[in-house]
Image: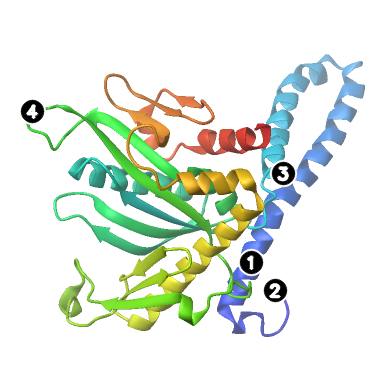
Amino acid sequence: MATAGFWDNQERAQATIAELKALNSVVRPLAELSQAADDLRAMAEMADDDPGFAAEMPSELTRLEATLDDLELKALLSGPHDASGAIMTINARDGGTDANDWAEMLLRMYMAWAKDHDYDVEILDRQDNDEAGINSVALAIRGPMAYGYLKGETGMHRLVRISPFNSEGKRQTSFAAVDVSPEIADSVEIEIRDEDVREDVFRASGAGGQHVNKTSSAIRLTHLPTGIVVQCQNERSQHKNRATAIKMLRARLARIEEEKREAEQAAKYNDQAKTGFGSQIRNYFLHPDQRVKDVRTGHYAGNFQSVLDGDIQGFLDSYLRWRVAK
């Protein structure tokens, strides 16, 4: 970073800084833990002569165990792209307007989690629903091990509540699909042949000022061999929308390659297109009682609102442990 010309290429500089943050997130706690272990050893020796040191040891042990537990979790983030940023898409599925509202609730949940962990969030594409909520959204979440932590969120998320959009106050079940892929640096080779990609240009929809719907700036890319479809219409520039769509396509293809190397993950990928009852990875209940439970790991939270406010780290950690234990 001290080299002359380091900041000449902003994208490369930011990638280097992100790599440094990822390394420091492991190296610094490890160094601190090693030093704390030495201090604890010395404290134990002095405890024979001074009861005050003996009284401090239980709380210090508890603190060190928590640090060690965090490091052990980071050791599970050893996949080829785990240190990368994450590109997440959220799509409303079954449930009508409730599903659109539920998709937006999930968006706020993930953004709150990212803010709590000092991660950067960029909305790449957002399509609002005419009545409420969103049809779909794509966002980039950037920070140390963002993809490693969030990759287990891929799948169907199910909400059960009394519908605020139903005048009869009936219980409604809604679904939203979450997909998470690693954000791949331009320096990483991902083969995308021009003949394998169909590009469609269309007019952007939704709020956008005086230029909206006047120019065909929105881009949709279809990768013919895999059937992957990505689109971006956030920018007024067709060039910028195309660049973002290509970034999203590279991320999806990189994840497929990663999952091909791991048979279990490939099976999950094939299952994720299922929608409706029985396909969800996590259930969120607001009625008849408030709770959130992960179908795969069994991890449970009794405070629905805290989860929606971004307190999902327990679910992310339990998925990492579950994946290793399988």
Is any atom of residue 149 visible in this view? no
Foreground residue among 266 and 139 = 266
Is any atom of residue 190 visible in this view? yes
Quarter of the figure with residue 102: top left
The x, y position of residue 258, in whole percent, is 62, 56
Disc marking residue 168: 4
Tell which circle, 1 or 2, labels the residue nearer the N-terminal end.
2
Q: Amino acid at mark 2?
A: Met
Mark 1 lies on a secondary structure that is helix
Tell which circle, 4 or 3, labels the residue nearer the N-terminal end.
3
Q: CA distance from mark 2 to mark 4?
A: 62 Å
At horizontal 73% and vertical 35% (from top left) the residue drawn is 68
Q: CA distance from mark 4 to mark 1?
A: 54 Å
Disc marking residue 1: 2
Neighbours of disc 1 within 10 Å: few (<14), some (14-19), many (20+): few
- Asked if the residues shown at circle 4 and circle 3 are in contact, with their CB atoms under 8 angstroms apart, the answer is no
317 lies left or right of 158: right
Between tags 2 and 4, which lies in front? 4
Tell which circle, 4 or 1, labels the residue nearer the N-terminal end.
1
- Asked if the residues shown at circle 1 and circle 2 are in contact, with their CB atoms under 8 angstroms apart, the answer is yes
Which residue was labeled with disc 3?
Answer: 75
The C terminus: image quadrant: top right
Q: Amino acid at mark 1?
A: Ile
Neighbours of disc 3 within 10 Å: few (<14), some (14-19), many (20+): few
The x, y position of residue 23, in whole percent, is 71, 56
Q: Amino acid at mark 4?
A: Glu
Relative to residue 259, is residue 125 depicted above or below? below
Relative to residue 82, is residue 298 depicted above or below? above
Which residue was labeled with disc 1?
Answer: 17
